[in-house]
Image: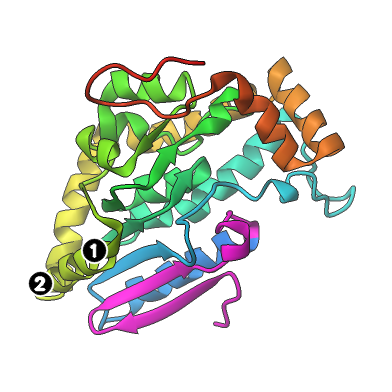
Amino acid sequence: MEYEAITYAVQGTTAIVTLNRPEKRNALSLQLLRELNAALLDADEHNAVHCVVLRGAGPHFCAGADLSEFSTQRGPEYRGRQEIDDDVWRLELGQRLRIALFDMHKPVIAQVHGTCIGIGTELAWFCDMVIVADDARIGFPPVRDLGTPPGSMWLYHCGPQWAKRLLLTGDSLTGKDAAKIRLALKSVPAAKLEAEVMRLAGRMGLVDPHLLSANKRLVNLGLELMGARTLQRIGAEIDARGHIAPKARAFRETMKAHGVKYAFQQRDAAFGHDYVTVDGPDEPLP
């Protein structure tokens, strides 16, 4: 398959999938998600591949959804975005394409650098292990004005209190602090990130892929018994509910009238300092 929005390569026993829209900070378009899904299925079927590394081209991992697609219409004979069921349908479509990271038999490591925010975090949290750069930015600022994380995996990674602390404010964490609350396996200096990820991938390359699959599925079935898959379905419904909140409607109108950048600036201005700290008091708002 020819890819445009991603790149795919096999290096030894590791398949490397790279989000390849650096001019858009690797924002997730429907084309990118469909190509990502196809590449993951290819890697899962390829006998030489033991594990997958998911990373982003350029200075960022993923800056979330491509909001320029929000108003895209295929015509009156197709679903729009006005009715709540249409919104849920589209959210579930995105979920099905992303959750292949969780469902595929072979393990996936997310290699996160730069910005990893919004729906970009959903890609990372569906992976089996996340290794981040110390200075990465991790967060879900769309909870301030658009809705909720439809992937709904925050609870399973960092627990209820930190999930609420981040999702009730839209504040961000550094990669180093994200690792402290278990949103990531570990953080390392940015210059050492790729080597760290590939070293781990190489170690899994020494293990029979059928055993890798058995152990991944054992842990993931445990997550499913804790409701992880059911919460995805609920997550789409709740996110669609969030989309009809007055402030969410106002944000979309601002975005249409003045553009995405202006809408973000207006949204975030009152929050001032955007980062929460794990150790010690947060910096006060100006």
Q: Residue furthest front?
A: 286
Q: Say which of marks 2 and 1 sits in front.
A: 1
**CA gap, disc 2 to disc 1?**
24 Å
- Front residue (pair 278, 215): 278
Q: Quadrant of residue 275?
A: top left
Tell me, for residue 93, which label it has, or none. none
Q: Position of residue 277 (x, y in %)?
A: 31, 26
- Front residue (pair 119, 1): 119
Residue 160 in view, yes or no: yes
Drawn side of residue 124 relative to residue 178, left or right: right
Q: Position of residue 186 (x, y in %)?
A: 20, 48
Q: Amino acid at mark 1?
A: Lys
Q: Provide the residue designation for mark 2.
A: 207
Query: What range of the chain is rendered magenta?
Result: 1-30
- Front residue (pair 107, 22): 22
Q: Secondary structure at mark 1?
A: helix
In this rendering, is residue 203 above or below 182? below
Q: Provide the residue designation for mark 1.
A: 192
Other-residue count near label 1 (Cα within 10 Å), few / some / many at <14 / 14–19 / ≥20:
few
In this rendering, is residue 143 above or below 109? above
Q: Residue at x 60, y 27 (%)?
A: 268
Q: Position of residue 132 (x, y in %)?
A: 30, 51
Q: Secondary structure at mark 2?
A: loop
- Front residue (pair 271, 212): 271
In this rendering, is residue 180 above or below 205? above
Q: Amino acid at mark 2?
A: Val
Q: Is residue 25 magenta?
A: yes
